[in-house]
């Protein structure tokens, strides 16, 4: 077989794979039946959340902004996005909320992430977040203040190591691989950057490479598409221009469990989270975020 033929086969294979991914991705569900298909016992169903993250219509229309001292709300932007992917049902067949008050109530419900919610009058999250950017931004600002001032969960946890021992980082990456590639979850990572800066992103895909992992992520500073980072075994940190060296910590895992539980309850399925104290677990997530990376 000639080199040209081999190259053509690779191009065709890649194109077919990309087309298949786009078909699988689709948009966030418009009915309860569509929503509950994600809990079916099939490989395609298990990957639906990660597939949804590849389509820009399911992603926030505006990037990280606002916050205390205009430092951004990346933690809360990312968690709001994850809540949408896990719990939203869009109902374009229904009228839009009639008042600002109704919109605020809906946006707060999205933030809370304790039950599946309908978004009436909108086709998708891109449309909803573009039209209601100011209200969503206000909610993200309030969420940051609540976590930081009321619960004290993040302001004392911003300073930490930007490099760690290579074996420890590799162990952490293997945990992320199990979490995202095997268990098919969307992982929230806090990025410990130099000084008192802390960023966050969502890990929506990860694959093994010859000498490490290829990590697919959603960054609130570039929220319209998923990006890729190449981690290599032996690295002591991640490095991205503009961020410098940083260490990614997998966090808010209890919050993810609560989102799954809310979806399963909505679909009439057994949930392991039912008897757990949501407020206590939320505080535990915040305390872990506060402590990770701090000597």
Image: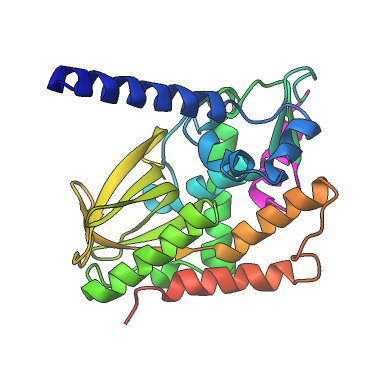
Which image quadrant: the C terminus?
Answer: bottom left
Answer above or below: position of 168 versus 23.
below
Is 114 a magenta residue? yes
Is 292 a magenta residue? no
- Residue 14 falls left or right of residue 255: left
- Residue at 51% x, 64% y is 148
Q: Residue furthest front?
A: 1
Query: In this orientation, which residue lies closer to the viewer: 238 or 14?
Result: 14
Answer above or below: position of 15 versus 273.
above
- Residue 288 falls left or right of residue 270: left
Q: Residue furthest bottom?
A: 295
Answer above or below: position of 48 versus 265.
above
Q: Residue furthest right?
A: 268
Query: In this orientation, which residue lies closer to the viewer: 101 or 220?
Result: 220
Query: In this orientation, which residue lies closer to the viewer: 115 or 229?
Result: 229
**Bounds of the magenta segment:** 98-116
Residue 236 visible in the current orientation: yes
Which image quadrant: the N terminus?
Answer: top left
- Residue at 35% x, 25% y is 13
Colour basis:
rainbow
Q: Tell me which secondary structure the magenta stretch mostly adopts.
A: helix
- Residue at 80% x, 20% y is 94
Q: Quadrant of residue 246?
A: bottom left
Q: Quadrant of residue 151?
A: bottom right
Image spot of residue 71 (x, y percent): 37, 50
Q: Quadrant of residue 216?
A: top left
Image spot of residue 210 (x, y percent): 23, 53
- Residue at 64% x, 60% y is 257
Residue 164 visible in the current orientation: no
Image spot of residue 3 (x, y percent): 14, 22
């Amino acid at each position: 077989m000639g080199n040209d033929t081999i190259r053509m086969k690779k191009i065709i294979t890649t194109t077919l794979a990309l087309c298949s991914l786009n078909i699988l991705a689709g948009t966030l569900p418009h009915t309860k039946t569509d929503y509950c298909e994600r809990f079916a016992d099939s490989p395609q169903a298990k990957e639906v959340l990660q597939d949804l993250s590849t389509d820009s219509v399911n992603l926030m229309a505006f990037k990280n902004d606002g916050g205390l001292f205009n430092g951004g709300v990346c933690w809360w932007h990312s968690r709001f996005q994850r809540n949408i992917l896990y719990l939203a049902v869009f109902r374009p067949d229904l009228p839009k909320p009639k008042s600002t008050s109704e919109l605020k109530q809906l946006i707060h419900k999205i933030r809370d992430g304790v039950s599946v919610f309908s978004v009436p009058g909108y086709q998708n999250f891109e449309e909803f977040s573009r039209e209601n950017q100011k209200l969503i931004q206000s909610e993200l600002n309030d969420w940051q203040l609540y976590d930081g001032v009321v619960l004290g969960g993040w302001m004392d946890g911003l300073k930490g190591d930007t490099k760690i021992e290579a074996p420890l980082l590799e162990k952490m990456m293997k945990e992320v691989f199990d979490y995202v590639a095997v268990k098919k979850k969307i992982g929230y990572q806090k990025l410990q950057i130099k000084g008192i800066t802390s960023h966050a992103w969502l890990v929506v895909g990860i694959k093994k490479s010859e000498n490490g992992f290829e990590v697919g992520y959603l960054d609130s500073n570039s929220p319209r598409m998923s990006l890729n980072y190449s981690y290599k075994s032996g690295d002591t940190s991640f490095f991205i221009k503009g961020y410098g060296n940083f260490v990614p910590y997998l966090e808010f895992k209890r919050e993810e469990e609560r989102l799954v539980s809310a979806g399963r309850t909505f679909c009439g399925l057994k949930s392991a989270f039912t008897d757990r104290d949501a407020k206590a677990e939320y505080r535990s997530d915040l305390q872990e975020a506060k402590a990770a990376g701090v000597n």
